[in-house]
Image: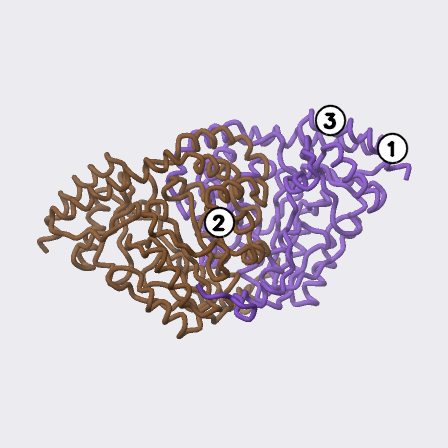
Chain colours: A purple, B brown
Amino acid sequence: MASHADDDKVTYTRLIQRLPSSAPFVGPEALERKSGVKFVLRLGANESAFGPSPRAVEAMREATPRVAWYADPEAYDLRGVIAHHTGASIESIQIGAGIDELLGVAVRLFVEPGNATVASLGAYPTFAFHATGYGATVERIPYKDDRNDLDALAEAARRTNARLVYLANPDNPSGSWRTGAEIAAFVDSLPHHCTLLLDEAYLEFAPLVAHTPIPFAHPQVMRFRTFSKAYGMAGARIGYTIAAPETIRELDKIRLHFGVNLVAQVGAQAALADQNYLAAVVAEVARGRRQYEALASDFGLTALPSVTNFVTIDVGGVDRARATVAALADAGVFIRMPGAPPLDRCIRVTVGAQSDRDEFERIFRDIWPSIASK
Amino acid sequence: MASHADDDKVTYTRLIQRLPSSAPFVGPEALERKSGVKFVLRLGANESAFGPSPRAVEAMREATPRVAWYADPEAYDLRGVIAHHTGASIESIQIGAGIDELLGVAVRLFVEPGNATVASLGAYPTFAFHATGYGATVERIPYKDDRNDLDALAEAARRTNARLVYLANPDNPSGSWRTGAEIAAFVDSLPHHCTLLLDEAYLEFAPLVAHTPIPFAHPQVMRFRTFSKAYGMAGARIGYTIAAPETIRELDKIRLHFGVNLVAQVGAQAALADQNYLAAVVAEVARGRRQYEALASDFGLTALPSVTNFVTIDVGGVDRARATVAALADAGVFIRMPGAPPLDRCIRVTVGAQSDRDEFERIFRDIWPSIASK
């Protein structure tokens, strides 16, 4: 076999070579491997300790032997159920392996290398991972009053001639929300060649006023929803986008047609059919938020208003936030903190089951005084 | 809300706008919806009627409630098992949602718009789907003697200054194979800036001589393997690539880190651990190939030599092949035919279970005489 001297090295694309080594998240498993400490409480990734509907679990168990067969690449049945559930037409819906995958395909649809995109500074990092990965720049707009600053985001979109704006509503990691009417006005204020990627991963937890009246087929809006959060199926990797039929047709030109697990599709249909279970989860998560808010209040800390399955607590500064995350990790509790100011003065804690919350509360009460005294 | 006149239309990238509407495959479900006839025998997608190992099914059933949690984005445990099984280092391995997803990421690593790639004319279409989708050209080299023409592929790679050559060994849709030594010599004949994407989806069915002695860390080779075929988990969407550690590090810059279903990862580990089951499937598939070969021979037809889980039968011309596919579809049997000459004189039939094969044989004996007489 020929030897390969340095000057013969395989050449990756210029874009790939310029990219830094990065991943959107370091998983808790990698943290465990590094520290040698196993987490006993996993409250850092906004997963649902309540799990999927028991009916969805049963449907998935029953469907397991069918993994011998490829799923329908058009996901016709599941899209039909989603259409019925949302009111969007089936031509406006496509599924993917979670919002993460769909955001990547959306970036490919609209962004050429060198194009600008806009997102909040410290927003969910997977959008920027994809945008950067496809050669776009990301203009980052700081949160204002701990919420997405819609005016500044729109101004940045106009100023940079952005092709895309990414916005999560409800927002992660702040837990805040804008009204659907505000989102609609925001879209109206965008340049005509700018599309809003509207991440609605946490929408099921939010009040109806957070649902936007923008028509599903609006040409400048792609919505993203998931079975990972309220539906409790993060590990199944399944979500969907709703957009104009033309956008879905363009997406079909490039998306991975055989990318979503068949059993996950069966589970998603069963999960959608059990809205009573969803409502119970949402109610229990609301109770859990109040528990965390009360805990924060006990120590004179402020919990940011949240309509999600997590609570972001202002602990008074980035050093304290880091110390809190570290002390909790030492005690076997996995949480995260927002990555950028002004939210990096906070920790973000997922609402777990009652026993998880009680255990978190016990440990937090134990570690907090020494952090507060420094 | 603002109206959107035609000149205000959202602009997709120039590349997307130029792409034709296409999908790698039209699924049997879409064919059923169009014809109104349900397939009773599914022998067109080289799925495994034998399914996954019962131990894998049990492991997946047991793991189902764990879909509430994200999988380890580094897939450390599964990659460790694959490393143990293959002898490749864990740094040389990355998983994805089937070979389909991994081919797309590989194309992104190496191809800029306008670059050339090379593949056999009529090869597995998903490579070309991705290459075209990322703006590359695909130089297509006809099969020679119903096998991949290695000399012509290498010549085309040199002539076009190709960044990638795609090659399946064993090959789909011909069922043929090259020896591992031939593949190694082929790689040596490629330009230093050309990488071989070696699709080994059917390798488990092939004799040892088809395994290539190319080192796993060779800088110009990415291997692709899957749990979809011999391991019987097509619907689970899980496969892996083996390549130089540097290539895996570059791939990690852009791959979907949370794309593979957690239960599929559990199932893949259990499937790898049950090599006795795999051996039984491979032996039964070999018996099934002989049954199809004997059937073809009964009618004076030639079955191409196959070391896969399908048999490609020369029915004497493209019109006869189309008529056979259509007649079988009318009888409720889903098969496919190769898409390009010279192989489009053939039909391709997946080796099913004994009862499937008997039913296929009965129906084929019924429909063939009228096709042969035309």
Along the line of sight, which residue is nearer the eye, B290 or B191?
Answer: B191
Callout 1 amino acid? Pro
- The answer to whether marks 3 and 1 sit on the same chain is yes
SS of the residue under disc 3: helix
Rendered residue at 50%/69% (across/down)? B113
Image quarter in which the N terminus of chain A is found: bottom left
Query: What's the mark number on residue A369?
Result: 1
Q: Could you tell me how far apart the alpha carbons at marks 3 and 1 are, in whole angstroms?
A: 17 Å
Q: Which residue is mark 2?
A: A94
Q: Are marks 3 and 1 in contact (CB under 8 Å)?
A: no
Query: What's the mark number on residue A359?
Result: 3
Callout 2 amino acid? Gln
Q: Position of residue A200 (x, y in %)?
A: 61, 46
- The answer to whether marks 1 and 2 sit on the same chain is yes
Q: Are marks 1 and 2 in contact (CB under 8 Å)?
A: no
SS of the residue under disc 2: strand
Rendered residue at 66%/28% (across/down)? A353
Image quarter in which the C terminus of chain A is found: top right
**Chain hosting mark 3:** A
Left or right, A361 with reference to B52: right
